Image (cartoon, grey):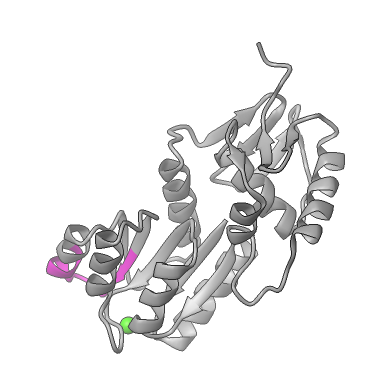
Amino acid sequence: MRILVVEDEPVLALRLQQTLEAADFAVDVAYDGEEGWHLGDTENYDAVVLDLGLPKLDGVSILRRWRDSGRAFPVLILTARSRWSEKMAGFQAGADDYLTKPFEMDEVVYRLRALIRRAAGHAQPELACGPLRLDTLAGRFSLNGIPIQLTAQEFRILSYLMHHAGKIVSRTELMEHVYDRHFDSDSNVLEVLIGRIRRKLDADLIHTVRGQGYRLADEAAP
Ligand code: CA
């Protein structure tokens, strides 16, 4: 899962980036409104953290532009304290949730995980595919009730497939949601990672669909 953070305060931007990376997200950061709008318009994100007061282009305008051009990712806006009119403007522009500064860093993680899960059409916090479970709030996988240890990259891949279980996910789509924009990767690396995840799962759950991509599914299920 990949997140865009648009925040002009360098200290807060860095804390958000570190917190989200520690929670196994791939993170891109934009420090002004124009760069933020451009990244959201051209890259594929699972969710966006958007400050409203930004240089060059304000958050509400960015959000309105994204929504007008059909960008549907969940957006969590950051607002100054007690600015109700600002929050309203954010919602009217298409925000999904908001946080009032100052806030607990962990709360950003929990809200984003819930927003991403909801956007993928899941109501329950736990996702299941046969013996494989993902506790979306805690960010942990288990197989037959036993926790699976995954690297951050492996976690992002499996998490994306799990949120879209049963659907074919192309290699391009998967890579766009697993790596930040500075990461130089190719599909060979992706295949190696998929191989490692398959061995850790010790179950035939990730299927290769020839020429199309991958699909997470429990074929043993009736
Ligand atoms: Ca700001």
Residue beneath the point at 23% across and 66% down: 64
Q: Is residue 194 left or right of residue 82?
A: right
- Magenta segment, which residues? 77-87
Residue 135 position, x and y percent, is 60, 39
Q: Residue furthest front?
A: 211
> If the picture is divided into quarters, which one holds ligand 1?
bottom left
Nearer the observer, 126 or 106: 126
Q: Any magenta on residue 179?
A: no
Residue 157 position, x and y percent, is 67, 51
Nearer the observer, 62 or 23: 62
Q: In the rendered view, tell whether residue 35 sits above or below residue 19.
A: below
- Quadrant in which the N terminus appears: bottom right
Residue 126 position, x and y percent, is 55, 34
Q: Any magenta on residue 81?
A: yes
Q: In the rendered view, tell whether residue 206 sits above or below residue 94.
A: above
Residue 76 position, x and y percent, is 36, 61
Q: Is residue 131 left or right of residue 70?
A: right
